[in-house]
Amino acid sequence: MAKRTDLPDDRDVKTDLDPEDWDDFRRQAHRMLDDMVSFLETLRDRPAWQPVPDWVKGELTAGIPRGPTDLGDVYRDFQTLILPYGNGNLHPAFHGWVHGAGTPTGMLADMLAAGLNANLGGRDHAAIYVERQVIDWAIDIFGFPKGASGLLVNGTSMANLIALLVARAKHLGLAVREQGLGEAGAKLVAYTSAAAHGCIAKAMDMAGFGTAALRHIAVDRDQRIDLDALSRAVAEDRARGLTPFLLVGTAGTVDTGAFDSLEGLADIAAQQSMWFHVDGAFGALAVMAPELRSLVDGLSRADSLAFDFHKWLHVPYDCGCVLVRDGALHHQTFESAPAYLARAERGTGAGAPWFCDFGPDLSRGFRALKVWFTLRQFGIDRLGAAMVHDCRLAAYLAARIAAEPELELLAPVALNIVCFRFKAEVPDLNRLNADLVIDVQERGIAVPSTTRLGGALAIRIAIVSHRTVEADIDRLVEAVLETGRRLAG
Ligand SMILES: Cc1ncc(COP(=O)(O)O)c(C=O)c1O
């Protein structure tokens, strides 16, 4: 092999990336930690959200730094350019989409995980055993059997895709990994409800089936999948020579927090030999609260489940999870062992099975540590109680809406999501409600989001934060009324 002769002699140069002065670094590190703890302690003193100013956007387009910058200067830029302009989800008045609020403990765990810089693709180190323990806890929480498997991933979208790929291998055999979908694959069809999250269709697309192979079954007035319509659709597809292979139920729909009848879906999946997957992104965690548990009856009969730790369990982003009842099949669906990843009986290369054989990622961070800290520090009873608190606030908001003639509830409140609108005699009520939401956001009062129910644009309040209290809901209602009246002229 040719010898490189053009490389500089760096023997007298500091080439490692550790601090030159550890004491100085320690001081800076303590300051950053103290500042961040103070920031979290005083969240309420700041607006729920504020727009990123143009000058900040401009600063964040500067080109790649070729030379060094003092750590203190980089941190100062973090404080002025980044810290004040978050998404708002830390704030008690953030009710948009479905965002976890994080916890100070999660922040510390993430710092420790970054310090360890563990790669959980595989090999034999303690972090692997932590993720296994977390997966075992999840298996226990959801009543999956021994032999079930799981994997921490970046979120429920990825967890749904992984489950779908295992279902694909179940129906087409493991040969699908080599041969692709083929003729049999072209006949496979899947079912979910019209209220399902868009990532299910995306997963069908990415798995090679195409979104047209996913049937969106109608929902009833409560946004739950219509079981009769589902049975009819399955029969029609069979009559056309197609093969129903996958049924995806939702535990907590994204728009309204509705729960499909998981028992009903499990029965139909069993009768029709379909894989039964549950997208439980946030709602599946209702299993942790005795008051909510009955909503997920039937969940333990699922072949697979996708859910997030980063939503209602407040583990810092990102952290989702997939569980698969047939752990062996899950492993077979993703296993691969090239020479450079040889497994060993002893030494660093031991510790099989490796997590890289349960999903697409080889390099994987230590997400498990922040889950481990969160579950251990709070315990699932307290985390469940925080969810029940959010549901109580949702019921409180629904009652306040019912008492206000200018407000109208647009969907039943099954869990922690409230969809409503401001009513007025205006040419475009949807426009008014969309503007109202943006107005409330831009004034930093609260962060609602919107969705469409039927033709109506709804103000959507998802109460996910463990920090939200009744006074936040009162403030929100007052702001909606005041803004609605102003915009209606
Ligand atoms: C029901 C449901 N499924 C899937 C997702 C996607 O989850 P993630 O954002 O973690 O990928 C969401 C997100 O809100 C959801 O509500």
Image (tube, rainbow, N blue to C red):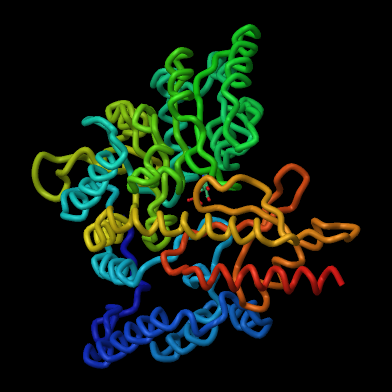
Q: In this view, does 72 lie above or below 309?
A: below
What residue is shown at x 55% (from left), y 63% (from top)?
A: 95
What residue is shown at x 50% (from left), y 43% (from top)?
A: 252
- Measured from the top left, where is residue 450 in percent x and y? 67, 57
Q: Is residue 476 above or below residue 290?
A: below
Image quarter of residue 7: bottom left
- Measured from the top left, where is residue 245 in percent x and y? 50, 19
* Depth check, front residue: 170 or 447: 447
What residue is shown at x 42% (from left), y 23% (from top)?
A: 169
What residue is shown at x 45% (from left), y 30% (from top)?
A: 262
User: Can residue 364 be seen by looking at this rendering?
Assistant: yes
Image quarter of residue 4: bottom left
Q: Is residue 133 above or below residue 431?
A: above
* Depth check, front residue: 239 or 179: 239
Is 419 placed left or right of 373 in the picture?
right
- Measured from the top left, where is residue 475 in percent x and y? 59, 73
* Depth check, front residue: 337 or 452: 452
